[in-house]
Amino acid sequence: MNKQKLNIILMGPPGAGKGTQSELIVKKYGIKHISTGDMFREAISNKTPVGLQAEDYITKGLLVPDAVVIALVKERLSKDDCAHGYLLDGFPRTIAQAEALEKLSIEIGRPLNKVININVDAEVLIKRIVARRVCPKCGASYNLDFKKPSKDGICDNCGTELIQRKDDTRESFSTRLEAYNQSTKPLIDFYQKKGILTNVDGLQDIDGVFAEVSSAIEGK
Ligand code: AP5
């Protein structure tokens, strides 16, 4: 397998495990992880113009407007560190974003070759979301049911107090799920028709999901 040619999209509803699997993929395959959610959270914490534009949408669980996200990804994907492969997590989320990505990835000579879609039922998603805790300093993610930190409320990596994301409330989650069903789900069909989509069962434990993800990446 040629690691230099892995240009991947990881798709799935909120809480499906995209961030969790991204961490494992990046470790195993050495490609660059691009999470639009993480980029927005960083921009919000640094109070940049993009952060100020995005904050209200994110807290409410709404999608950030296409033009803002596309401009952000365009700049990021064109950087040198994506030349040996990239993993897009949380982008594209609309047909307009998918079309912009298709054009851009060809323009910069880094065409997409795999889309992995993680399937998880809604009642499991909400349980995962409300139990998630994250480290505001290093970004590590935990789960009070499945992946607890060694010491209650404290990040294993850097000792910082863990927090709950502002959009991990039940109310915001239901808006996020609605946005997913309305705007993002149609992308499954979009990529299926292109013959590059693999579905993965996200109801398994983290290692089980990763085994399927790895098989999809390696074309087994
Ligand atoms: P983003 O940060 O992308 O959020 P999301 O898509 O809602 O996904 P999450 O981060 O909530 O979940 P995940 O799938 O990564 O799951 P995780 O691995 O953490 O986006 C946030 C917001 O930014 C959006 O709502 C939107 O406003 C904006 N935005 C971002 N991109 C945009 C775009 N392209 N266009 C417009 N707006 C955009 O897992 C969840 C929990 O479950 C964790 O606690 C984890 O430990 C646990 N878990 C994971 N896998 C398993 C498993 N197999 N078994 C048990 N527990 C598991």
Image (spheres, grey):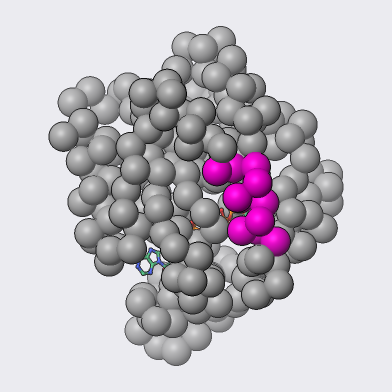
Q: Height in image: 121 above or below 151?
A: above
Image quarter of residue 86: top left
Q: Which residues are magenta?
A: 175-185
Q: Is residue 142 above or below residue 145?
A: above
x then y, percent, for residue 139? 52, 62
Residue found at x 23% / y 43%: 214
| Residue 34 falls inside the magenta stretch | no
Q: Compared to 148, does 199 lie above or below?
A: above
- The reply to whether residue 131 is visible in this rendering is yes
Q: Give the residue at x 63% y 30%.
A: 95
Q: Main secondary structure of the magenta part?
A: helix
Q: How many marks?
A: 0
Look at the picture and state if 193 lies above or below 13.
Answer: above
For the residue pair 193 and 99, the one nearer the viewer reads as: 193
Of the 4 image quadrants, the one containing the N terminus is: top left
Q: Residue at x 44, y 70 (%)?
A: 124
Quadrant in the picture for the C terminus = top left
Q: Position of residue 199 (x, y in %)?
A: 34, 43
Depth check, front residue: 102 or 193: 193
Residue 166 as seen in the image, left or right of residue 12 = right
User: In the rendering, at what x and y percent does residue 91 appear?
Assistant: 57, 39
User: Which of the 4 image quarters holds residue 99?
Assistant: top right
Can residue 28 be seen here? The reply is no
Q: Nearer the viewer, residue 38 or 161?
A: 38
Q: Residue at x 57, y 66 (%)?
A: 137
Looking at the image, residue 143 sits to the left or right of residue 93; the answer is left
Which quarter of the picture shows residue 20?
bottom left
